[in-house]
Image (spheres, helix red, strand yellow):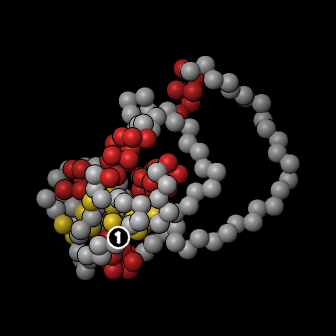
Amino acid sequence: MRLDEAAILEGGPDKWKAENRPLATDPTVHPSATLSPRGRPDTFVDKGIVRAAIGDDATLTLNALSHDQHQGTGGVIYGRPGRIEGSSCVPAASLIGSDKALKPIAELRSAFDGVGAAPDKRILVYCGGGIAARLDAFVLTALLGHRNVSVYDNSMQEWANDPDLPMATG
């Protein structure tokens, strides 16, 4: 996944206000422009690609849900409890500090290094429906410099409801 000129308002508007940063309430008028989107077919993957990655040492499948959901012991269940077989877990919520901003780069790097997210690996990130996975993907690409990251956006909503797809718990 490649994110060009992406930004996150870390901590949200409450943190922004607490830091006495400037706010504007006037409507902003931008000049007309032409949008020229470029397709990036590697940004998102489907269940076939995720299934083919199981057991592939060059690919890390990464769950952005909570550790309880990853283990199949709690949280929202999207069908069968647990995780995609062979996947590791770096919860998106664990990337955010108490101030609602992303944790320092060293801590973020340590979290991903701890599950084997080497820069040369292909990384497929999933969650319940592809939303939390985007934060993991953002951190990996925009902050940690990974270049081969994709999101499985149908995630557990699709995977856990297909009895032919392998799941693991525990």
Q: Is residue 51 above or below residue 35?
A: below
Q: Residue furthest right?
A: 31
Q: Is residue 138 left or right of residue 70?
A: right
User: Where is residue 36 shown, x and y percent of the image?
Assistant: 75, 66
Q: Is residue 131 above or below residue 56?
A: above
- Report x, y in % for residue 48: 38, 80
Kindly give the residue lying farthest to the left in the view shown.
170
Numbered-mark total: 1
Q: Residue at x 79, y 38 (%)?
A: 28
For residue 27, side relative to residue 131 (left or right) = right
**Disc 1 residue type (three-letter):** Thr
Q: Is residue 38 visible?
A: yes
**Considering only vertical position in the picture, is 156 above or below 138?**
below
Image quarter of residue 126: bottom left
Residue at screen point 41% across, 56% down: 133
Q: Is residue 151 visible?
A: no
Q: Residue 27: x and y, percent?
A: 78, 35
Task: Tell me the quarter of the image containing the C terminus.
Answer: bottom left
Per the image, label 1 sits on a secondary structure element best described as strand
30 or 157, which is in the foreground? Answer: 30
Q: Nearer the viewer, residue 84 or 60?
A: 60
Left or right: residue 36 compared with residue 101: right
- Mark 1 crowd level (few <14, some 14–19, many ≥20, 10 Å Cα): many
Q: Nearer the viewer, residue 114 or 9?
A: 114
- Relative height, residue 90 to residue 151 (above, below): above
Q: Nearer the viewer, residue 163 or 121?
A: 121
| Residue 26: quarter of image | top right
Q: Residue at x 27, y 64 (%)?
A: 87
The spot of residue 99 in percent (x, y) is: 43, 28
Quickly name the residue at label 1: 59
